[in-house]
Image (tube, rainbow, N blue to C red):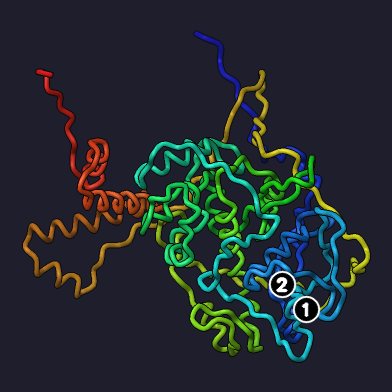
């Protein structure tokens, strides 16, 4: 009999490469950004976590671009301490805005502090936002190298994304990874209205297939994909620690999370050289717009940019129309009911100014640094009693949803009673199968496969491999035979 085995110690939390010494994980570190054209009680436009420094601070350029998106793509904005104050000018490429006070986002071409100009307009929703083709913020402009990939269709696009990325772009894990859309599938109408297919890898991918392009996707571990779709973070450019003149895309937290911040905030992501910055900016915008709900709910009328009429004054009651819940998707394609964001009394800081850290407009603001290297192998395996061995933890399983109960309402029973016995059995079988699919496949991959199979059925020509897969998805058994005479 061979020698026995040894148990290992319980797993410990993964550690970031630099021990997170350059960031904050204090969820109370946040900054309010105000619109200077409204009364103080109605002026908070946006509140963002300030994790870019251990003492709390937010990278100036990230804050400026975020506010610029909401102000209808105004990249010429700047910050002041009060509605009439002088501009706070960053002295270095990686300067930050310290916590301790609110900041006003001002526009030079329309100084809303004067009596004639009025407030500058705000875009109230992602659907009303127009993409700034040919007008990216300077910090977001970069050269991309198109990925060298074989021809792919929607049915094998996951393989194409795996071929290009090979591992999660945040954690470098290879197990439990999924393709994640940058412009979400449920924004397909916005995608086409803004002609985002211009930035696709496959320029022949048009119509409803256009959004299913590898340039609009990256590989994420399943749990990180869930957080990504919950708008907890985005990918933004920040100056590199080794060469501040070169911008690198990092994970930036938009929703306070101690664990995500400690592991990933300001950590350089794995290479995404072939993904256009345009799609990454879309994702940032999509995550930001739900954060201005508090601004829209205040009592003041506002100047909003609407899809139909452009900039116009909108009453406080009309502003609430932009907050109507819409159906959303959790991961890539699975349909679900939109979950309302819970009210959080701590989401906004106190309306009064904070008198902690003061910031003079002529004083150099603090600086931050991003992690020198990407997350490589964050999971440090516990040691064994006798020696050590490598180990990679699997991501947590996604939550499951209960299978729907078969309908028993009288009208549906009457409907079944009106069928023949064979049809009634078929109907009951389909209902049972649907319930089991919902239980065992909470992410809706079955729905994606069925949509693909139905699309293949409409094609005039298909490969043998596609036909076999299509028949299998539709519930047909495919028997492999071989002609012995060949």
Is residue 164 depicted above or below 434 in this figure?
above
What residue is shown at x 69% (from left), y 63% (from top)? 65
Mark 1 — residue?
351
Disc 2 to disc 1, how far (Cα)? Answer: 8 Å
What residue is shown at x 21% (from left), y 44% (from top)? 461
Is residue 10 depicted above or below 158 in this figure?
above
Q: Quadrant of residue 312?
A: bottom right
Mark 2 — residue?
348
Q: Quadrant of residue 86?
A: bottom right
Relative to residue 283, is residue 16 drawn left or right? right
- The numbered disc on residue 27 is none
Relative to residue 457, is residue 483 drawn left or right? left
Which of 137/284 is in front?
137
Q: Quadrant of the C terminus?
A: top left
Q: Specify the farthest residue to the top.
A: 1
Secondary-structure class at tag 1: loop
Label tally? 2
Q: Are marks 2 and 1 in contact (CB under 8 Å)?
A: yes
Q: Is residue 337 visible?
A: no
Secondary-structure class at tag 2: loop
Looking at the picture, how far across and down is residue 14, in whole percent?
67, 39
Looking at the picture, how far across and down is residue 439, in whole percent?
36, 53
Looking at the picture, how far across and down is residue 19, in whole percent?
77, 41
């Amino acid at each position: 009999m061979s020698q026995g085995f040894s148990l290992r110690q319980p797993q410990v939390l993964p550690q970031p490469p630099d021990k997170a010494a350059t960031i904050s994980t204090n969820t109370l570190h946040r900054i309010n950004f105000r619109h200077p054209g409204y009364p103080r009680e109605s002026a908070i436009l946006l509140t963002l976590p300030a994790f870019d420094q251990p003492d709390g601070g937010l990278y100036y350029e990230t804050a400026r671009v975020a506010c610029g998106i909401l102000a209808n793509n105004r990249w010429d904005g700047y910050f002041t301490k009060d509605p009439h104050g002088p501009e706070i000018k960053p002295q270095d490429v990686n300067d930050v805005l310290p916590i301790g006070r609110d900041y006003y986002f001002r526009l030079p071409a329309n100084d809303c502090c004067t009596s004639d100009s009025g407030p500058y307009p705000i875009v109230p929703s992602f659907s009303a936002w127009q993409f700034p083709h040919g007008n990216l913020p300077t910090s977001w402009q970069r050269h991309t190298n198109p990925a060298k990939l074989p021809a792919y269709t929607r049915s094998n696009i996951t393989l194409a994304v795996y071929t290009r990325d090979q591992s999660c772009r945040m954690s470098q894990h290879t197990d439990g990874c999924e393709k994640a859309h940058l412009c979400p599938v449920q924004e397909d109408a916005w995608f086409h209205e803004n002609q985002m297919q211009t930035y696709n890898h496959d320029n022949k991918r048009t119509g409803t297939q256009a959004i299913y392009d590898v340039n609009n996707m990256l590989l994420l571990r399943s749990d990180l994909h869930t957080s990504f779709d919950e708008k907890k973070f985005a990918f933004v450019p920040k100056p590199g620690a080794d060469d501040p003149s070169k911008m690198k895309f990092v994970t930036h937290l938009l929703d306070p999370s101690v664990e995500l911040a400690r592991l990933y905030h300001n950590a350089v992501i794995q290479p995404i050289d072939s993904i256009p910055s345009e799609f990454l900016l879309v994702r940032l915008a999509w995550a930001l717009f739900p954060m201005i709900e508090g601004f829209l709910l205040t009592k003041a009328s506002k100047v909003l940019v609407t899809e139909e009429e452009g900039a116009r004054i909108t009453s406080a009651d009309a502003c609430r129309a932009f907050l109507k819940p819409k159906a959303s998707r959790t991961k890539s394609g699975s349909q679900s009911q939109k979950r309302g964001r819970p009210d959080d009394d701590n989401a906004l800081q106190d309306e009064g100014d904070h008198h902690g850290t003061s910031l003079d407009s002529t004083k150099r603001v603090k600086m931050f640094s991003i992690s020198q290297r990407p997350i490589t192998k964050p999971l440090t395996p516990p040691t064994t009693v006798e020696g050590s061995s490598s180990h990679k933890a699997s991501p947590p399983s996604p939550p499951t949803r209960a299978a729907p109960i078969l309908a028993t309402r009288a009208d549906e029973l009457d409907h079944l009673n009106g069928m023949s016995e064979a049809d009634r059995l078929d109907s009951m079988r389909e209902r049972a199968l649907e319930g089991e699919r919902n239980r065992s496949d909470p992410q809706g991959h079955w729905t994606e496969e069925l949509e693909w199979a139905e699309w293949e059925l409409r094609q005039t020509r298909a490969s043998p491999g596609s036909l076999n897969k299509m028949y299998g998805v539709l519930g047909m058994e495919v028997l492999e035979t071989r002609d012995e005479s060949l």
